Image (tube, helix red, strand yellow):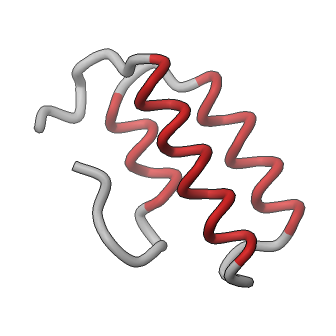
Amino acid sequence: MHQDVRASDAERDAVVERLRRALSQGRLTVHEFDTRTAAAYEAKTRGELSELTRDLPGSLW
């Protein structure tokens, strides 16, 4: 998928859910979760969203 495509609300929500799972698995601290969640809701493109989960297992797109 193209990283410069505008992100949808559903895609932002999916990233936040993925971050929530990473938090519950101990992969993120609460501070990292809060920071990334705020960035997810502000993201304009899929590339920005992808960057928030690049260091987590699995791929977004």
Q: Work out whether 34 lies above or below 45.
A: below
Q: Work out whether 22 lies above or below 19.
A: below
- The residue lying at 47 percent from left, 73 percent from top is 56
Q: Is residue 10 left or right of residue 18?
A: left
Considering depth in this image, is 23 or 38 the residue closer to the camera? Answer: 23
Q: Work out whether 24 lies above or below 46.
A: below
Q: How many dots with numbers? A: 0
**Residue 61 place in picture, x, y as percent:** 22, 49
Q: Is residue 5 left or right of residue 53?
A: left
- Residue at the extreme bottom of the image, as rendered: 26
- Residue at the extreme left of the image, as rendered: 1
**Residue 27 place in picture, x, y as percent:** 66, 81
- The residue lying at 31 percent from left, 53 percent from top is 60
**Residue 5 place in picture, x, y as percent:** 23, 20
**Residue 26 place in picture, x, y as percent:** 73, 84
- The residue lying at 11 percent from left, 38 percent from top is 1
Q: Work out whether 10 lies above or below 3.
A: above
Q: Is residue 45 left or right of residue 44?
A: left
Location of residue 25 by image quarter: bottom right
- Residue at the extreme right of the image, as rendered: 31
- The residue lying at 62 percent from left, 57 percent from top is 19
